[in-house]
Amino acid sequence: MTAERVHRTTHEVSLAAPAGVVHGLVADAAKWPLYFPPNVHVEQIESDGSRERLRMWATANGQVKSWTSRRTLDPARHRIDFRQEVPAAPLESMGGSWIIEPRGTDACRLVLLHDFTVAGDDADDVAWVERATDTNSRAELDTVKRLAEGFGRLDDLELSFEDSVRVDAPAELVYEFLHRVQDWPERIPHVSRLDVTEPEPGVQVMSMDTLTADGRSHTTESVRVCFPQARRIVYKQTATPLLMAAHTGEWSLTEDATGLTVTSQHSVILREENITAVLGADATVADCRRYVREALGRNSTATLDLAKAHAEAQAATSTPAAA
């Protein structure tokens, strides 16, 4: 801790769910981008089962922030303690705890504690952090409550899948196609509009209009985190179509002895309350799973095929003809 004043916040919620279920949701940080609205991406750097080190990206008051945290997980006590190693400005320090207090076998109370300092204890910076902490904590607790109390339905509503293509071209040509989203309206027919900003290197904030097979237009907003050395781009949709409560994904490139595989991966939580309004009075969750799988897969496969064609054409024009 620094010598700055320590500010503390407490947020809590009562849940009609077992403490073990709640602890499992909070402990699984890799799923936070799918489960928690503020979280964009989480990379686990180290883990021994009870202690872990994480790199995290999340939105705070509309801005994308990233930091590194250490967490200690204690499932027996239903407690997780965290401390940021490298906080994002204006923070000087940030830490806290998730504490789950059982209330019988099928109920509990979840308490989220934060303590933080800011440089110079600037009043505006303190207010900014308090506002972000309050907004994000409420969103996270509300989501844990909803998921934990409906945990028996989560397997039906959660959907993950991937599509891949093989590409006969250098990985950097494919990565360039996927990274330069500002060119997608000219390169990808189902993208009719796309606006993008880069608040910091490697982070893209974008708004995009896409066309479905039946001609309808959907507007989505996303945050993308780009890893050029690893040839990966991960993303979180921050504004989703009606059938999706959450949507995360990843573009990844893998080279082997025989060539390059480019993969598009999607993870979705369906918005069950909108199914009949969008798909018809008789539509079921199974119908929605098929619809979302086909719609997302169709668009991502089209993008993969266009990336393949672009990269292979580029490679062909840059390769000298044989004598």
Image: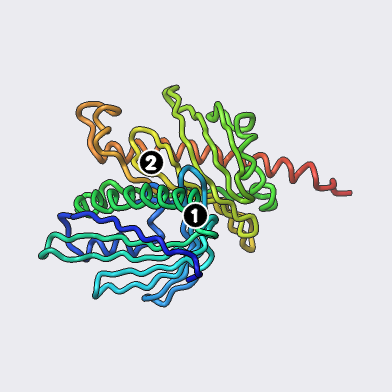
- Name the residue at 38% across, 41% down: 293
Counting from the top left corner in percent of width and height, residue 186 is at: 64, 29
| 17 shown above or below 79 | above
The label on residue 293 is 2
Counting from the top left corner in percent of width and height, residue 304 is at: 56, 42
Q: Nearer the viewer, residue 71 or 233?
A: 71
Counting from the top left corner in percent of width and height, residue 133 is at: 39, 52
Q: CA distance from mark 2 to mark 1?
A: 26 Å
| Residue 263 seen by the camera | no
Residue at far top of view: 215
- Name the residue at 50% across, 51% down: 125
Rate crowding at label 2 as few (under 14), some (14 to 19) or many (20 or more) other CA atoms within 10 Å: some
Residue at far left of view: 104
Q: Nearer the viewer, residue 269 or 253?
A: 269
As drawn, is 88 to the left or to the right of 314?
A: left
* Residue type beneath disc 2: Arg
Rate crowding at label 1 as few (under 14), some (14 to 19) or many (20 or more) other CA atoms within 10 Å: many
Total residue callouts: 2
The label on residue 282 is none
| Residue 255 seen by the camera | yes
Give SS at disc 1.
Answer: strand
Mark whose residue sits in front, 2 or 1: 1
Earlier residue among tags 2 and 1: 1
Report the residue marked by disc 1. 57
| 142 shown above or below 8 | above
- Name the residue at 53% across, 57% down: 88
Q: Name the image quarter holding residue 257.
A: bottom right
* Residue type beneath disc 1: Trp
Q: Nearer the viewer, residue 309 or 144?
A: 144
- Name the residue at 42% across, 77% down: 48
